[in-house]
Amino acid sequence: MLPDLQSLKRDIQRILDRYLQTQVHARLGVFNESPHHTIHEGNRLRTIRADGSVEDSNLKEASAEVMLKLDEIPQLTIEQRVAKINDMADKMAQQMNEHLFGALNATLDKAGQVVDQQGKPLDVDAVFKVLEKIQLDFDEAGKPDQLSIVVHPTLAPQAKLVFEKIESDPVLRERYEEIIVRKRFEWRDREADRKLVG
Amino acid sequence: MIEKLIENWLDSASERSYQAVFVQMLSAHGYRVVHSTRHTALEFGKDVLAIAPDGKGCAYQLKGNPGGRLGLNQFRQEIQPQLVQLMSQAVVFPGFPNEPHRAYLVSNGYFEEEVQRAVSDLNLGPYPSKVSLISRGDLLAWCEKLGTSLWPSELGDDRLLLELFLSNPRDVLPTTMLSRLIGKLLALEPLEAKFSGQPEFLRAITSAALLTGIATSRFAEAENHFAVASAWVLFAISIIAAGEKHGFKLREPALRTLRLAEAATVDALVQLWNEISKRKHLVEGNALADPEVYGWRYTTLLGLLSCLALRDDLDSVLTDDSRAKLNQWLLQRHTNLDLWGEGAIANLVPWLVWLRKHDATLRPDLEIANLTEALISRNQPKSVSPLAAPYYNFEDVARFRMRLDKAGEASAIGRETFAGCAFTAEPLFHLLVRTNLKQKCKTLWPDFSKLAHRGCLPDSRWEYCMLNITLGVDQTKIYPPTYKWADIQAEACQPVNDLLPEELAIRPWLLALWWQVTPYRYTPVANRVFAENILPGWGAWGKK
């Protein structure tokens, strides 16, 4: 073989792997803000929810390839390699997002937590229906905790209009506040119910 | 390479580090070892007592002559007087035949010709027992015959074996390396590996016993008792796993090997306690850097010594004086504990249960309540200082805290969220329920029910005995906000064991030691099995 520095290269590879991982996470959007748990052992997952329902799922693979031409390698700059890794991160994050949203949709469908507009454009009523359906937690200041609204990029302009309308129209604003107040009471009741009885 | 390694081991070992392997070789030859400890020496230099397959008693005096020869001068001055007593006086020991025994002088070096002649002359004397010599050549031949030929010899495994043998003997044991090697021999890895029958299984067990003793001999030589105990625990647990996986009920001689591994573990723990009881402090090594690890060491020692005390409760292994001192040490107030991660919970639980057994006051219950409260509050969803999952050891946590990641390796700790979930809160809460401090349980419940309770459940029981479960489910459990006291009480005390091999379930002290090696195996079911074995019926009296 030709002279090589395998130990050094292994460490460089680890740094590149770490960069890839960071980039993939950065592309996961709202999912990147959720807690990250490592599956240290085992080959599948199970969630037992508070209502006693059990959901089993399997691990999913996300992968991407990078092609390097051998004659390019001597001149390959770090920027060029980073671009290739970013490309891999795009592909992997896309697969992961598809799976995560797919799993989320399936779970929400099963739980009856879906608001179907049946082809109609996103409107104020749809947003209120969604807010009615979700369970909200509140922080110490009484504000909704960890509430994120995610829309498909094509829906973004319409969503912006809808939220501006809610913000500016006093009647809609009052309706929104009324839902939030109700949700806060529900949350208080829920927390007050956290008890060991008997 | 393996032959060279064995020779190197024999040429560098003192009797301290080859005794554990020697008794395993005797056992494999059909001998029943009735005494083999380094911590309570018998009179006249008898290190090992065994009963031969023909029923004859055998007494062995072990000498370490690493790489050398036992000459006449050393023999006359140090050994002959003891040997004469060994040959002339009856061995009085429970279970040892009350008739003239066979005496053996064992050395890992060579006996010079003059020594052999002197021994022959002694045998012509009027002593009831005769002495035989076992030397380096015999030990090498036994090693070969008993299974070093079975040791994994693929290039990668050779390297692993060498790395383990040469690893820093003053550090913690590289358990992953030892586990992989034992796993290959006992057909635990790969998953589908099988034995053709019981004889092959038994040979593999002996071979793995030799590997465990030899590969970790430098740790024994350095008197690194924690590492030695960890090695024999890993081996003992692996025998149980192999029996369970391959469907072989553990009976003689496999059971004999398991008992010897347990004895070697106990021996290491007793030596550890002997050292601690003589020390005025628990500082070790470089003092300037020790404050960072002192709390971990203290907590680890509390776990190990509690396991020893639990074993001693079942089957006296300590002298009365030593037991009294150990009990006193365990009963004192411990102010140097470090709750460095969930891994520390597995150190503290054996102590808490031991304390509950030995202290009739309310203190053990309050200690359990305090620890449970600390864990639950530290891991609340928005906690800024949650305890790391028990899959991370102290070194991982400390390196992350001090930004001392190994070259090129960013710690996985930084990529995982610990707030909002816990692996050990559920079993610990179950212990609290057993104390019947109902009001405390009610106070903690709101925060307890906010946690996601995680754990890995293996598909097969034998995988509970592995460092890593391949086929199993990573489970996350959310408790309902409102729960009945009677229901949590039933969960905490139910005697169902659907997780552990029965051979492990009946050895609670070994189970607790397994948690010292793999803190993530401290699960609700294992906790119940342990508590029920140590304190049968604890907490069940208040059940409605």
Image (spheres, coloured by chain):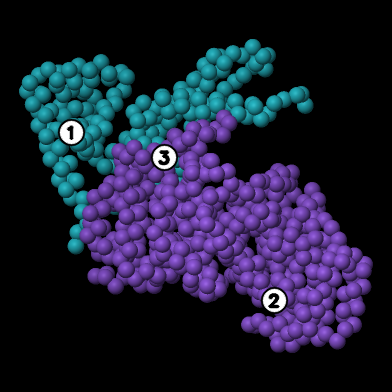
Chain colours: A cyan, B purple
**Amino acid on which disc 3 is placed:** His
Tell us which disc is closer to us: 1 or 3: 1
Q: Which residue is mark 3?
A: A37
Whether residue A54 is visible to the viewer of this picture, yes or no, is no
- State the CA–CA distance, disc 1 to disc 3: 28 Å
**Amino acid on which disc 2 is placed:** Glu
Same chain for marks 1 and 3?
A: yes
Q: Residue at x 20, y 36 (%)?
A: A140
Q: Which residue is mark 1?
A: A141
User: How packed is label 1: few (under 14 Cα within 10 Å), some, or many (20 or more)?
Assistant: few
Residue B509 against residue B153 in the figure, above or below: below
Q: Residue at x 73, y 85 (%)?
A: B90
Disc 1 is placed on an element classified as: loop
Left or right side of B53 for A114 = left
The residue lying furthest to the top in this view is A75
Whether residue B250 is visible to the viewer of this picture, yes or no, is yes
